[in-house]
Image (cartoon, helix red, strand yellow):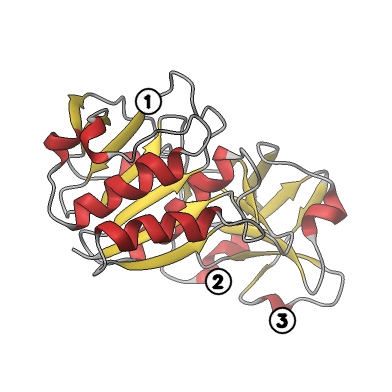
Amino acid sequence: MNTIALITDFGMADGFVGTMKGVISTIAPQAHVIDISHESAPQHTHHAAFVLWSSYKYFPEETVFVVVVDPGVGSERRIILVEDSDGKKFIVPENGILRFILPDLKNPKAYQVNNSKYWLTPLSSTFHGRDIFAPVAAHLVNGVRGEHLGDRIELPIPESPFISVDKSPDELRGKILHSDRFGNLITNIRPKFEKLDELSAYSLEIGNRHIDTVKKTYADGDYGELIAMVGSAGLIEIAVRNSSAQQMLGLRIGDPVFIRRKDV
């Protein structure tokens, strides 16, 4: 176990990310640190939750994921460590960042990270990424076990936000789950078909616009055409070739999306 993966809202203009890496390198110089993203919208825990969900499956077992999007830094919010049965570990503030992945984890164990032995001192009230998250991740890489970092806690497992469309439903109501930097609107609808062509039996309604065909790639759409497709996350997304569906439709996360069988 020597991989640490970082997600923050720090950006790269200041020295926050580099400082965290410096702490990790001091405690665990053998650690391989990977930047997933440092461009989450400031204090936008929903965005960080989606980025984590869409990326964590592609990392090796026993990777330590550190997510510092923490509008409650310095408050009474807890810092938690969650361990999956395959060895993946997640160090996050308890603010909903694990909402998408918790339903997928197998037999997760959770701990409140409250053993200050593994923190830096003095402790800043505004930069826990440096003083708690980074050193704790480094100590995990060095072999410290979760039970040494704090008290065992129980976490409620939320319902999965994803819904599936298959050959049975006549209508489904989904929602926009994420808007990426290209303005693609990613829904929480996951198709379950052997062939993409089977989605042609459905039409999609979003923002009072109807989409009757599903494309395979962005390039299959005409310039300026609103299209539906199954994106890399396995979810139905709405896009505009070489443009932004989010700007075209003016929609936001949580806005509804309907998918209906055409022959109903």
On screen, 128 above or below 210?
above
Q: What amino acid type should be assigned to the residue bearing mark 3? A: Ala
The disc placed on residue 219 is 3
Q: Secondary structure at mark 2?
A: helix
Q: What amino acid type should be assigned to the residue bearing mark 1? A: Arg
| 3 or 2: tag closer to the N-terminus | 2
Residue 224 coordinates in the image, percent (x, y): 87, 70
How many numbered discs?
Answer: 3
Q: Which residue is mark 1?
A: 78
| 1 or 3: tag closer to the N-terminus | 1
Closer to viewer: mark 1 or mark 3: 1
Q: Which residue is mark 2?
A: 197
| 1 or 2: tag closer to the N-terminus | 1
Q: Secondary structure at mark 3?
A: helix
Farthest-out residue, bottom? 219
Residue at 47% x, 30% y is: 95
Quarter of the picture containing the C terminus is top right
In the visual, does 197 lie left or right of 34? right
Note whether residue 166 is visible: no
Residue at 49% x, 44% y is: 49
Quarter of the picture containing the N terminus is bottom left
Packing grade of label 3 (10 A; few <14, some 14-19, many >=20) is few
Residue 120 coordinates in the image, percent (x, y): 33, 41
Note whether residue 65 is visible: yes
Residue at 37% x, 44% y is: 133
In the visual, does 115 lie left or right of 241? left
**Which residue is more in the foreground, 94 or 182?**
94
Q: What amino acid type should be assigned to the residue bearing mark 2? A: Asp
Closer to viewer: mark 3 or mark 2: 3
CA distance for labels 3 and 2? 17 Å
CA distance for labels 1 and 2? 47 Å
